[in-house]
Image: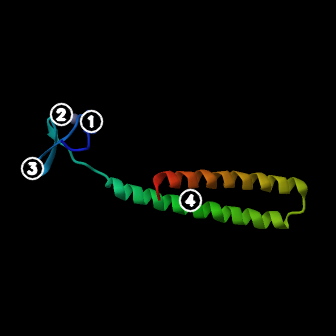
């Protein structure tokens, strides 16, 4: 028995020689997609890219806020900043949870 299950019926799969067989469907199963650790590494990379995007947005907003003298527009910018900051916080919590 291997650690994957059949994509069709979710039965545990067995390895027979080079093939992976589902005993219930009685057919060989091709495991597609990327390995779990590769997927994890890819996920980490994506999170890093998102983080740098968010940091870029925070930087842009900071510049705009510094130049803005209208209180109403400043407040709107501050709200946008707060959205990005909480997104960043959630993202970092997510990255920590992944152990990266
Ligand atoms: Zn099956």
Q: Are marks 2 and 4 in contact (CB under 8 Å)?
A: no
Which element is circle 3 on? loop
Residue 17 has which mark?
Answer: 3
Q: Are marks 4 and 1 in contact (CB under 8 Å)?
A: no
In this rendering, the answer to whether 68 lies above or below 1 is: below
Q: Are marks 2 and 1 in contact (CB under 8 Å)?
A: yes
Q: Mark 1 near ligand 1 (CB under 8 Å)?
A: yes
Look at 67% across and 62% down and name the residue there. Answer: 57
Name the image quarter holding residue 92: bottom right
Residue 8 has which mark?
Answer: 1
Q: Earlier in the sequence, mark 2 or mark 4?
A: 2
Separation of disc 2 and disc 4 at Cα? 41 Å
Dot 2, crowdedness within 10 Å: few (<14), some or many (≥20)? few
User: Is the N terminus in the top left, top right, bottom left or bottom right quadrant?
Assistant: top left
Separation of disc 3 and disc 4 at Cα? 43 Å
Q: Earlier in the sequence, mark 2 or mark 1?
A: 1
- Mark 4, residue position: 50
Name the image quarter holding residue 53: bottom right
Q: Mark 2 near ligand 1 (CB under 8 Å)?
A: yes
In the picture as drawn, the residue positioned furthest to the left comes out as: 17
Q: Earlier in the sequence, mark 3 or mark 2?
A: 3
- Mark 2, residue position: 25
Dot 4, crowdedness within 10 Å: few (<14), some or many (≥20)? some
Of residues 86 and 79, the one nearer the viewer is 86
Q: Position of residue 19 (x, y in %)?
A: 14, 48
Q: Position of residue 33 (x, y in %)?
A: 31, 52
Which callout, 2 or 4, points to the residue nearer the camera?
Answer: 4
Name the image quarter holding residue 34: bottom left
Separation of disc 4 and disc 1 at Cα? 34 Å
Separation of disc 3 and disc 2 at Cα? 18 Å
């Amino acid at each position: 028995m291997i650690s994957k299950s059949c994509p069709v019926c979710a039965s545990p799969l067995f390895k027979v020689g080079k093939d992976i067989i589902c005993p219930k469907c009685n057919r060989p199963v091709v495991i597609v997609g990327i390995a779990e650790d590769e997927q994890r590494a890819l996920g980490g990379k994506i999170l890093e890219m998102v983080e740098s995007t968010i940091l870029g947005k925070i930087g842009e907003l900071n510049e705009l806020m510094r130049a803005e003298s209208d209180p109403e527009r400043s407040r709107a910018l501050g709200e946008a900043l707060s959205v990005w900051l909480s997104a960043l916080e959630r993202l970092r919590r997510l990255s920590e949870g992944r152990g990266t």
